[in-house]
Image: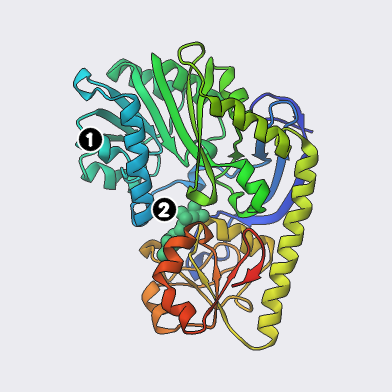
Amino acid sequence: MKTCRICDHKIEPFMSFGKMPIANGFLNKSEFEKEYFFEMKVSFCENCYMFQLDEQPDATMMFHENYAFFSSLSKYMQKHFKSFAHFVMELIPLPEKNSFVIELGSNDGIMLEHFKNANYRHLGIEPSSNVAKVALEKGINTLSNFFDLNLANEIYNEHGLADAIICANVMCHIPNLNDIAKGIARLLKPNGLLIFEDPYLGDMVKKVSYDQIYDEHVFIFSAHSVAKAFGTSGLELVDLIPQTTHGGSMRYVLAHKGSHKASKSVIQILEEEKSLGLNKIETFNKFKLNCEASRDSLRELLEGIRIKGETVVGYGATSKSTTVLNYCNLNTDHICYISDTTPIKQNKYTPGMHIPVKSYDFFKSDVPKYVLLFAWNHSDEIFEKESKFSEQGGRWIRFVPRVEII
Ligand code: TYD
């Protein structure tokens, strides 16, 4: 029997998604043979409420010089990170007092550049060297390294304590969360704030958006699990702000215990989580059945289209799509190619199922009848951009919050 990554309580996986490759491991034909796979099983800890991956591939296999994710490519995310930065600046509004902001997983500097422009002292920590390089080229102070307690001590020695430690879509990637929490508590001023956001377990359970589960997301957090995980390092929740990004996220604000008064939304969201059962294993046994039903109906729908001889193209070679394609066993019989605007993914193949990834220009020159929306978290932006496709009789297929043709 395994033990919980946070509290060491005995846990057992409640579900397996089967054999999975690296979600962002877009590859060339010559790399098919040596592709890495692991069995993706998930557990829920009844003691500290943490939803977690049973096994996670080594970090260096996921985050490296060819990491295929550049935050700044999405206009919507650019806007979101700007508003996140301003939210933080309102909480620590005194750059003239030499306020210091640290971002974990600062990617290409999409968020820190707002702090740089407002003259905050800032430091980004970004393990993927290719994206860190882009940030450095923009003049954003960045260390290409993995954050842990040792690095926290080094940063403390060089820069002192931070007013805010922030991160977006990063905390849920970090397996040694206890160590990170200690490092954060070590680096935060007595009245400092930890502010982070990640895909939210409540949304995932409600929408059956199981595609949030992939190698990088070792945890899917709730307010319950975050309170427990950071509580042992002396931090507590002081605010919770739901977000629409990534198909439903939560922004968590934490501080040293007793240093800040908690907002009403902390109690309210903890209560909502209890009603939704995010503190009970039964909820996840039901979630498993919902995932299986979603998988079966998506397969059935795509099989039906295939039998009719019609073609389906995927929209957005997201990390999430790797879970959907491999779990539902969808290959080029079902999806001829996936259109994606990220240059590093184009002309490669999707992890595991090896569906070709083509450029958006190719998609525009070859408009299909059916488009499967893998980037469903960007629906508004995409539907607006592709209004002609629908007007000309094109049909969207989606699988969140339910499998349907629209
Ligand atoms: P993202 O939303 O970050 O999802 P994940 O975290 O699961 O990777 O990825 C969006 C992907 O979709 C990215 O590869 C870019 C692509 N995309 C398009 O191709 N066209 C679009 O209009 C949008 C919004 C995204």
State whether residue 25 appears in this view. Answer: yes
Q: Quadrant of the N terminus?
A: top right
Q: CA distance from mark 2 to mark 1?
A: 22 Å
Label 1 secondary element: helix
On screen, residue 399 versus residue 363, left or right, reads right
User: What is the number of the mark on residue 44?
Assistant: none
Residue at the spot 54% in from the left edge and 19% down from the top edge: 236
Q: Which of 280/44 is in front?
A: 280
Give the image quadrant in which the ligand numbered 1 is located. Answer: bottom left
| Image position, residue 362 (x, y; %) | 40, 79
The amino acid type found where label 2 is placed reads Phe
Q: Which residue is mark 1?
A: 116
Q: Is mark 2 within 8 Å of ligand 1?
A: yes
Residue at the spot 51% in from the left edge and 13% down from the top edge: 257
| Image position, residue 225 (x, y; %) | 63, 30
Q: Which of 264/319 is in front?
A: 264
State whether residue 50 appears in this view. Answer: no
| Image position, residue 305 (x, y; %) | 66, 82
On screen, residue 133 versus residue 288, left or right, reads left
Q: Which residue is mark 2?
A: 69
- Answer with mark 2 or mark 1, whichever residue precedes in sequence: 2
Label 2 secondary element: loop
The amino acid type found where label 1 is placed reads Lys
| Front label number (2 vs 1) | 1
